[in-house]
Structures are given as structure tokens and as C-alpha cells.
Image (cartoon, rainbow, N blue to C red):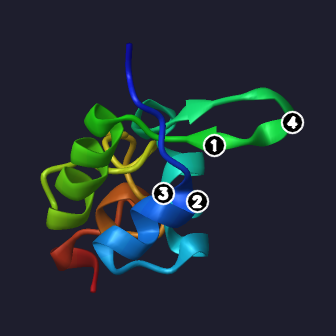
Amino acid sequence: MPHFRTPEDVANELGLKIGMLRRICRTNDHLCTRLERGRLVLTDENVQGVIKHLIGGHERSRGANDLTPDPFTEESRGVSAADK
């Protein structure tokens, strides 16, 4: 049976502000367990996932892997170097 910990306990252990840890958990649902009334708890696996996220071994945020071209770049507007 997993041992659940509060975000306050984990934030103090990791040296984070509580709000920062909650924000990480809200944006990455796989890094926490949600209870009723929007409460968050973390297991030991969740804590390891948060540590990996902070170190930089996490996937980019949603939408960052989108391969659609940026509409504001010159290449996507059809402007070439010869047109300049």
C-alpha cells in the first residue's frame, strides 16, 4: 500500500515553495494523485517524478512538440532571402 504525503511535506523536503510544487502537479497529472475537492497527495513514485521534472529529464510541456510552423517566421509567410 503506497504511503501518501502532502505537498507541504514534499515541498519542504525538496526546498520548493508549496505553490510551485502545486503548479507542477497541476500541469503534469502523472506527478501526483488527486483526491476529492481538488486535494493533492504524492507517493514516493510521484516525488521521484517531480525530482526528474525539476532536473530537466521531463518531456516538454503540452504543445511544445507540435510541429506546426510558427506563423510569424519568414519561412512560413513565404518570404525568401531573394525577396528581401
Name the kind of residue labelled 3 in the image.
Ile
Question: Is there CB contact under 8 Å for labels 3 and 2?
Answer: yes
Q: Residues within 10 Å of mark 1 (few under 14, many from 20)?
A: some
Q: Which residue is mark 2?
A: 22
Name the kind of residue labelled 4 in the image.
Arg
Examine the rendering and report whether any part of residue 31 can be seen: yes
Badge 4 marks a residue whose secondary structure is helix
Name the kind of residue labelled 1 in the image.
Leu
Q: Is residue 77 left or right of residue 37?
A: left
Q: Which residue is mark 4?
A: 37
Front residue of 8/30: it is 8
Of the numbered discs 1 and 3, the one sitting upstream in the chain is: 3
Q: CA distance from mark 4 to mark 3?
A: 18 Å
Quadrant including the C terminus: bottom left
The mark lying in front, picked from 1 and 3, is: 1
Q: Which residue is mark 1?
A: 40
Residue lying at 47% horizontally and 62% vertically, measured from the top left: 9
Badge 2 marks a residue whose secondary structure is helix
Q: Which residue is mark 3?
A: 24
Q: CA distance from mark 4 to mark 2?
A: 14 Å
Of the numbered discs 1 and 2, the one sitting upstream in the chain is: 2
Q: CA distance from mark 1 to mark 2?
A: 8 Å
* Relative height, residue 66 to residue 71 (above, below): above
